[in-house]
Image: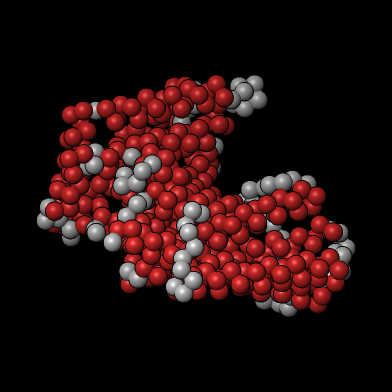
Amino acid sequence: MSEALRLALVVAGKDLRAELRSRTALLSALVFSALVLVIFNFARDPTVLAAADLAPSVLWVTFALAATVTMNRAFTVERENGALDGLLLAPIPREAIFLGKLLANLAFVGTVEALTLPLLILFFNVDFGRALPGVVGVTALATLGFVSVGTIFGAMAVRTRFAELLLPVLLLPFMVPPIIAAVQVTSRLLAGRPLSEMGGWLRLLTLYDIVFVTLCTMVFSAVVDE
Amino acid sequence: MTTPLPPADSTASRVVRRGLILSGLALLALAGVYVLALGYTPIEARQGLAQKIFYLHVPAAWSALLAFSLVGITSALYLWLADPRLDRFAAASAEVGVAFSAVMLTTGPIWAKPIWGTWWTWDARLTLTLFLFFLFVGYLALRASVHDPAERARFSAVVGILGLLLVPFIHLSVYLFRTLHPQPIVLKPSAPSLPPAMLRTLLISFAVFTVMYVGFVMARYGLSLADEAREGGDAG
């Protein structure tokens, strides 16, 4: 197990190094999510709806869109020069490759989210106050689940003719349960509600993570092996 | 479909013919269901004539859910057995399922407008079926955009399995919203709570829609067989 984890970290490290040297995907994803926030700001009527009431939904729609855009890159970078074949030929179990890709995707999506959150606070003037650790926690919980589904779908979409369009079409239905749960928890956190009101949603998120991380790890070899 | 008809004696053409005959019979029986629904069943006291749409809406929903569940199950089996028949069946079933969900998603709002006063509401069941519809439209889009048949089969099987597991999560996550949708009337612990004439018509309609599903899937399955035979012939 620890060997698989080490190999997964090697795969993830390779992706992160490649990204840090070019920084194009990450920067574009950041600019993208900033633009989404700006559009949201102009799409709402400030006299009708207070920014703070809208913040959870704006936050999660932005996260969902930015994550979809970011996840496309994990396997598109492997497309050039048959890099994926090289990766598959390496003596690494498929599960470790998947976990490595998942970790790299989590790092990218997590970075974009970590920088989008302050932008939301800045643009929408929301005071997260003591809710901040909770929001970070629920973000991590929700992100893990849909990023693992996104990693599998990214590996498939890249081999199709309309990768950029197909990934969101396939992935968004899978984002619905974690996003609904995350929005519910976030708005309750911002309203300072007790933890007992979020228990059901948090259990749902945890179960989703367990089911989909396990399942995606299992089916990954069906996606990449001829 | 630009596929030319396969030779009359091939397996493909036999399957297509049987599927078409079965579909034709089911469509004739569907006309019978219309007659029964309009002439034989009593008019519901509170909903009036609007309730008649149930004889289409509920069986269409049944066929759609049957179609999608079978896609999920055959997908899982495909990854295990790698039998191309399973993939062909899943593809046919998904296509037919999308058609039936389209019937369900159009008849629903037509009924809901006079009865609920709104075309659409984010009720648990509505949301679930809408997302199933989207999921399988995505499934078909994926199939259409992968060229290699083996790869297409593996990819769509993965989506099929993940989709099957997504259903309980969508259901759980929307269930907490108060549900407006009528509660089960036929399949519930106590006896079905509707007049015998209504129940009989509804059950007949269920049977008709099931036969229609089988007929459509058979025809579609035969067409994929013909398609594969033609592509194999081109390559060889």
As drawn, B98 above or below B202: above
Total marks placed: 0
Residue B89, image x, y percentages = 45, 67
- What's the residue at 55%, 61% (across, down)? B96
Q: Residue furthest left?
A: A91
As drawn, B201 above or below B95: below
Q: Tell me where residue B20 sits by quadrant.
A: bottom right
Q: A96 or B231: which is nearer to us?
A: B231
Residue A185 appearing in the image: no
Q: B133 or A213: which is nearer to us?
A: B133
- What's the residue at 20%, 31% (across, down)? A20
Q: Quadrant of the C terminus of chain A?
A: bottom left
Q: A30 or A124: which is nearer to us?
A: A30
Residue A46 appearing in the image: yes
- What's the residue at 55%, 53% (across, down)? B133
Q: Quadrant of the N terminus of chain A?
A: bottom left
Q: Tell me where residue A115 sits by quadrant.
A: top left
Residue B156, image x, y percentages = 39, 58
Residue B72, image x, y percentages = 45, 64
Q: How is the image coloured?
A: secondary structure
Horizontal side of A157 relative to B31 (left or right) equals left
Residue B167, image x, y percentages = 50, 59
- What's the residue at 34%, 36% (across, down)? A70
